[in-house]
Amino acid sequence: MSEYAVQMMNISKYFGSQAANDHVDFTLRSGTIHGLLGENGAGKTTLMNVLFGLQNADEGKILVFGEELALEHSPKEGMRRGIGMVHQHFKLVRTMTVTENFLLGLKISRYPLLNPRVVKKRILQLSGDFTLNIDPDAKIGNLSVGEQQRVEILSALYRDASVLILDEPTAVLTPEEAQEFFVILKALRKAGKSIILISHHLDEIIQIADEVTVLKNGKVAGTAKIDASVRKEDLSRMMVGRDVLFDFDTQRKLCGEDKLVVQNLCAKNERGLVALKDLSFAVRRGEILAIAGVDGNGQKELCEVLVGLRKSTQGSFQLEGKDLTGKSPACIIANHVSYIPEDRQTAGLVMSWSIRDNLILKMFRSKAVSGALFLHKKKIDTVAEDLSKAYAIKSQGLDTEVKNLSGGNQQKVILARELSQGPSLLVASNPTRGLDIGAMEYVRQQMLDVRNAGGAVLLVSADLEEIFQIADRILVMYGGRSMGIVMPQEGVEIVGQMMAGICNKELYV
Amino acid sequence: MNNDFIISLLSGTLRTSTPIILAALGQVYTQKAGIMDLSVEGTMIIGCLVGFMTAFFTQNLIVGMLCAGIAGMAIGAFMAYLSITVKANQVIAGTALTMFGTGFASYLYRVVFGVRKLPPVVQNFAPVNFGKLGEIPFVGPVFFSHNGTFYFALILVLVTWFVMEKTVFGLQVKAVGEYPSAADAKGIKVGLIRYSSVILGGLYSGLAGATMSLGYMNTYTDHMIAGRGFIAIAVVVFARWLPVRVLLAALLFGCANTLQMRLQSIGVAVPSQLLQALPYILTVLVLLGVSKYVNFPGGFGIPYSRNEK
Amino acid sequence: GGSKEVTEKTGDSGTKPLKIAVILPGKIDDVSFNQAFYEGMKQIESEQGSAISVTYVEDVYEVADIEPALMDFASRGYDLIFGHGFQFMEPIIKVAEQFPDTCFALGTGYKSVINSCVYDVKLGQGGYLMGALAALITETGKIGVIGGGDASEIYRGHEGFKMGARSINPNIVIQEFYTGDWRDAAKAKEGALGMYDSGVDVIWHSGDGIGLGVVNAGLQSDKLVLSNIINQNVLAPNNVVSGIDYRWDLVIREIVQDVLDGNFLNRENKFYWIDVANKGLQVSSFNQFKDKYPASVFEKMDEIEKGILDGTIVIPEFEK
Amino acid sequence: MKPTYNKISNIGRQMLPSVISVLCALLIGAGVLALSGFDPFESYKTLFSGAFGSRYSFSETLVKMIPILVISLGTSVAFKAQLWNIGGNGQYTMGAIVAVWVCVYSNLPVPLMLLVSFLASVAAGFLYGAFIGVMKAKLNANEVITTLMFDYIVAYFLSFLVYGPMMDPQGHGFPQSCLVSSQVLFTKLLKGTRLHSGLFLALALVVLLYLFWHTKEGFQVKMVGQNQKVARLCGLNVNRQIILTLGISAAFAAVAGWIDVMGIHGRLQDNLAGSLGSVATVVALLGGLHPFGILLSSLLFSALVVGGASMQRFCGVPFSLVTIIQSLVIVFVISSTMFGQQKQKRVKEHE
Ligand SMILES: Nc1ncnc2c1ncn2[C@@H]1O[C@H](COP(=O)(O)OP(=O)(O)OP(=O)(O)O)[C@@H](O)[C@H]1O
Ligand SMILES: Nc1ncnc2c1ncn2[C@@H]1O[C@H](COP(=O)(O)OP(=O)(O)OP(=O)(O)O)[C@@H](O)[C@H]1O
Ligand SMILES: [Mg+2]
Ligand SMILES: [Mg+2]
C-alpha cells in the first residue's frame, strides 16, 4: 500500500466568479484520521465533493493510492477507486429500508434482479464487525440521526471503501453518541481505513485526528500533526485569524417574573404518537432556559407548539399572562415570539430568494417597509442594508441568493430577521448546529443579548457544551416528559443521567 | 338488474379500461421517477396512428403494436429531453407535446392516407379463444371473451409490479424520484434512470394508443383518445403507483363509464350530459377519498441538477 | 368592411368563375355529415367545370373561429360561402349584413337574411324510415339508436325513428344513447355493444364520426346496423343492412344555380330542404340483404315512403 | 453606473434567445411545409398577413388574444405559488355560464346588469378555484388532476344547460341559450370588426397583476410558492393562502369567459372554450409568469392561431400543421432558456 491514500494538488473549483477552492493542496496518509477544519464556506465540503466526484474541479490533480484519478470523474468512479463519503446531509432515501438503500448502490449489470438476502447477510456481518448495530429491515425514516449516520458509514464500508470522507458527522450527534462514534472510527483506523473528518468541534479533532488541515476562504491556511502540544486556541486562530472568545459574560443582570408559563402540555408527533406528556415549566424574564435531551424526545414538538405550528392536545401556555394556546403563528408572532428553527435551509429561509427578501419575510406587513397595499422598495433596501450591517452578514450584496451563502451567514440572516424586533420570547432550536466557531460564538452572544435586554430565551440544544456555557437553568427532557430542572453548577454528569432517563429530578423543581 | 345487464356491464368495463390500464401502468415508472408527464394524451394518439398505419401496410397487428410502442418511446424521449436535459417546466413540456402529438397524428394520417371515401380499416385483434373457459356461465363472457390487448394489459400489470418491486432498476426508479441527490451519491445515473422511465412510460402510452385503433376499433380517427390519457394520469395517482391498484382504479373508471352508457341506453331519467360526467365526478370523489394517503415522490416535478443545493 | 379585394386572373374562359368557400366543422373524411357535404360539393364542382371554383376549409370546430373565417372569405371577394352547421347561424347573420353582395348558405338552422339561405334535411323523415325498417327486421323486438351530441337535427332524427318504429310495432323496445361527443367513435362502439348485449339486434346511428364505432360493434357482435348519411355497407357487408343516404348535392346544385342565375339575392326566406320528396333522403341499397328479407318488408317500406310523399304520414317538426 | 441602459440591454439579452428560437421553429415549420408540397414563403406570408396584414385581421388577433391573455394571467398567479391550475377551460366556461345566466334571467337595468354579471362571474370563478384549493389544502388532492377532471365535468354541465334548462325556447331546439340583451354587450372599438372594449379590461388586468406582485398580498403568494414551511413559520396561513390563490387564479379565467360573452358570443353554446385552457398554460409559462411577458406571448400565440387559420383557408395548409408549428415554438423557446442560462454561467466564470 502506498504511503498516501489521497493526494490532491493545486485544486481549484469556481462557482461563478467565486473560488470555493483556490489552489488547494491536501494529503491524506494511509491508515490515519485527518481532520479538516475551516469556517463556514471555507470550501471543505466542496473539496471533498471534488474528491468523491460529486462535483468536478476546474483545475488540479488527484492521486488515489498513487494513481491518478481523472478530474472529471463521477461518484461511481470515485467509489470504484475506494472512496466513500458520508455527506453533511445524509444521502439516504427515507422511504426505503436500510437494505434497499444498499441495493441501490450496487452494480446492476450482473444482477438485474434484487437479491436482498445476500445484501442483508453482509450488512449484518459488517455491522457486527464494527459494532454498528444496524437492523437491515428498518425504514430509514424511522431511524434516529445517529443510526442513519451509521448506515451511511456501513454503506461505504460495504462497497469496500478504503478512504472514508465524513462531513460533519458529529454535528447531529449527542455527546454520548459522538463518543460511541469515535470508538467506531478508531476501529476503522485499526482496520487500515484512511479517514477524512470534517468538524467544527476543535476538541473532537484534537481528540481523535492524527493530522489536520485548515481551510480559509478556499485556501489552505495550514497543516499540522496533532500531538500533545496542539491546543484548541492554536487551531481556532488558524481558522478565524483571531482568538475566539469562549468565556461569555454570563452573569445575570435581570431576572424577574415568569414570562413564559407552560402547564401540563401534551402533543402528538407526525405519526400520531404521544410526543409531549404533561410538560410544565416556566421561563423567566432575563433568563436562558435550556432544554437538554437526546434528539427526538419531544423538543421539536415543544418548539412547534410554542410557535403555533402544532396543536397541543392538552394543557396550555401563557406569555406574559396571555394565553396563547392553540393560537396561529401569526398571532404568536404578534406577541413578539421569535423562532430560530433547527432546519434553517428548509424551514428558515427561502433558499432561492435574495438576502433582502429573506430579511423581510416576517415584517413585510409592517409600516417600516410597506404602505397600505404596496411594498416600498426603498424602505426595504434601507432596512435590509441596516440589518445586514448590524448582523455582519458577509455577502456579495443584498441580491445574493441565500443558497449561495455559507451556513454561518445563512444563520445570521435568520437571526437578523428574528431578533431585530426585540423579541419577548426567543425559541431557538439547535441554533449553532453546523456553524463554525466564529459564527457559534456570535450566535451565542446574540442569545445572551436577548436575555440581557430582558427577553426570555428557550434554547433547545443537543450540545451540552453550549448549554453549560450560556444557560441559566437546564430542563432535561426524556420521552416527552420533563426529568426536572438542573442548575449549571450541578455539573454535566447528572444532566447526562437524566437525558438517559435514569434519574428523575422532577420532584424538587 | 338482471344477469345479462351485469355481464354486459362487466365485460364492457374490462374492454374500456384496457387502454387506461396500459397508459397508467406506464405512468408508474414515469411518476415514480419524479416526472409529471402530461404528454400521455399526445403520445397515445401518436401510438394509435402509428400502430394503425404500420398494421395497415404490413397487414400484421403485432408489427403495428411494436411500431406504436417505438413511436411512444420516441415521444417519451422527447419528453425526457425537455424535462430532464432542458430542465423545462414539466407542465409546459407535457402540454406542448400533447399539442404536438395531436397535430402530428392528424397531419400524418392525412398525408399518408389522403382523403378517402371510406376510411381504411384493418382486421383488428380477434377475441382470444379460450375454448371451454369461454363457455362458463357468467365468468366466460365477462373474462374470457376479449381480444388479446386486455390480457396483454393484465400481463403488463404483473410485469410492471415485478420490475418495480423485484428488480434493481425498479428500486433505482423509486430512488431517483424520491431523493435524486441520494441516488446520485450512490453512483446511480439519475438522468439515465429518469430518461429510461419516461421512455418506458412513452412505450406503454404508445401501446395503449394502439389498442384503441387495433384492438378496440379497427381504424383511426383524430379524436380517438378523447381524454383517456388524462384519465390515466389521474388513475395512477389515486392508485398510489401500485400496479395492482392501477388495474383496479382503471377498472373502476371503466365501470363508471360503461355504467353511464348502459343506463342511458335503458332510458334512465337523467339527462345524458349529466350521466356522461359521472366517470369524471367519480374520479374526483375517489381522489378526495384517498388523497390523504397519497404521497408524491419527494422529487416529483423538480428537475434534478447536481450543482444546485 | 373588407380590406382587400383579391381579384384573381382566371384562365382561358375570360369570365370570372363563381368563387365558393365551404367551411366545415369537421374533417372531410369523417364518413358522415361533413364528408357527405364535401362529396356533394365535389360533384357540383365537376358538373360546373370552370364556372365555379371552390375552396374547402375543414375542422373549424371552435365557435369563436367561425366569424373570422366567414369574414376572411367575404372580404376576399368570395361570392358564395357555405357554413355547414348550425353553429354558423349567428356569425353568418352578422357577416352577411356587412357584405350584402355576398351569398351565404347555412347548414341547418332557422334564421336567414336577404343574402343568406338555410339548407337542411328533414331528418324526421329519414329517422321515420329507419325506425320502420328496424322494426321490420328485428327478431328480438328490441332496437336501438345512437347519436353524437343531443343536437336538434339529431334529436329530430331520433324522434322520427321512434315514431316510425312504433308505427310498425307499438310495443317495440327502443334504446337510445348519446355519446355527447361528435368524434369519440370508441364510446359509440361501447354503447352499441351494450345494446347488443341486452338483446337489441338492429341499431341506427345518427352522429358524425361516431358512426364508425357503431358499424364496428355490429361487425364484432355480428348484429345489424343501419347507417346514416353515407352508405357504410362496405365497412361491414354482412352487418350494415341499409341506411339513409343524404344527397346534399341536390340543395347545393339548387343554391349554386340560384346564385349563378342571380336569383339568390332578391328573395327572402330561402330554405332548401333535402327530403324524401326530392330524393335527397333515400333508403340505401340493400346490397346482399336484398334476398334475406321477404318481399313484404320492401313493400312496406315503399308504402311508407309513399305515405310520406302524399301526406298520409305526417311527421311533426319535433322541436324540443 | 448606467442602470437604465443596463436594464434595457438586459431585457434585450433575455429576449434574444426566445426570438431566435421562434425563428428556428418557423424555419423547421417551413421545412415541413415544403416537404408536404406547400410554398413555405407564400404560406408564411399568408400567416403573417392573416394575423397582422389588415385592420380586420389584426383586430381578430387581438380578439383572440383577449381570452388567452386573461386566462394566462390567472394561470400565472397560481403557477407563481407552485399551484398547477391547468383547468382554464372549465373556469372560463363557468364564468361564461354565470354571465349569461345573470343577463338572461334577471331584469336589472343595463349598467347594473353588467356590473352584477361581472361580479357574479368573478365570484363563480373564485369559488370554483377556492373549491379546488380546499380539496388541495384540506384533503391533499393534486390540483393538476382535479382541475383536469373539472374541465370535463363543467364541459358536460354546459352541454346539459344548453340542451336543457337554459336552451333558448325560441331556438327551434338548437343547443344554445338565449342571447343576452344587446345593450349590455360591449361596444365595438372598430367598425366592421369584432374588436370590443373588453380589450381595455384585459390590458387593465395586465397592469393590475403587475401591481399586485408588488403588494403585500402578492409577496405572500410568492412566498407560499417558494417554501410553505417558511411561510407558515412567518405567520402565513398557508391553507388559506392556497385557497385564495387558486380562487384568484380561477377568477381571472372566469372573467375571460365573461368578457367573451359580452364581447363576442352573447350567449352560451356547446364547446365555448375550445382549446383556450391548454394554450393559456403554455402562454403563461412562456411569458415567464410576468404580466408583460404574458402580454407578448399571448399576442404571439393568438397571431399564430389567427394567422394559421388564414393559412389554412388560403394556402390549404391543414390546421394540424399549424398546431405542430405552435408546439415547435414552445419546444424551442423552452430549450433556448436552457442554452441561455448555460451561456450566462460561462460568461460569469470568465469575468
Ligand atoms: N452549488 C453551489 N453554487 C454556488 N456556490 C456554492 C455552491 N456550493 C458551494 N458554494 C459556495 O462555495 C463556498 C464553499 O462552500 P462549502 O460548502 O464547500 O463550504 P464548507 O466549508 O463546507 O462550509 P460549512 O462549514 O458551512 O459546511 C461557499 O461560499 C458556498 O457558498
Ligand atoms: N442486485 C443485487 N442483488 C443482491 N446482491 C447483489 C446485487 N448486486 C450485487 N450484489 C452483491 O453485492 C456484492 C457487491 O456487488 P458488486 O456488483 O459491486 O460486485 P463487486 O465484486 O464489488 O464488483 P467489482 O469487482 O466490479 O468491483 C456482490 O458480491 C453481490 O453478492
Ligand atoms: Mg457548506
Ligand atoms: Mg460543508
Image (cartoon, rainbow, N blue to C red):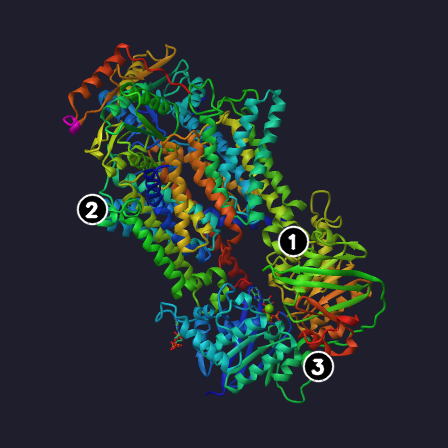
Q: Secondary structure at mark 1?
A: helix
Which chain does the numbered disc 1 sit on? D
The tag on residue A233 is: 3
Q: CA distance from mark 1 to mark 3?
A: 41 Å
- Residue furthest to the bottom in view is A228
Q: Position of residue C175 (x, y in %)?
A: 34, 29
Left or right of D272: which side holds B123? left
- Please determine whether, in this image, residue D165 is positioned above or below residue A200: above
- Give percent across and percent down for residue D51: 44, 33
**Contact between labelled residues 2 and 1, with CB atoms less than 8 Å apart:** no
- Specify start and end residues of the magenta stretch as a single range: C287-292
User: For mark 2, what is the residue?
Assistant: B59
Residue C236 locus on image (x, y percent):
21, 35
Quadrant position of the C terminus of chain B in the picture: bottom right
Instruction: Give the image location of residue B176, x and y in percent.
Output: 46, 62
Gap in angstroms between the C-alphas marked 3 and 2: 85 Å
With A43 as the anchor, is A245 left or right in this view?
A: right
The residue at which mark 1 appears reads as D232
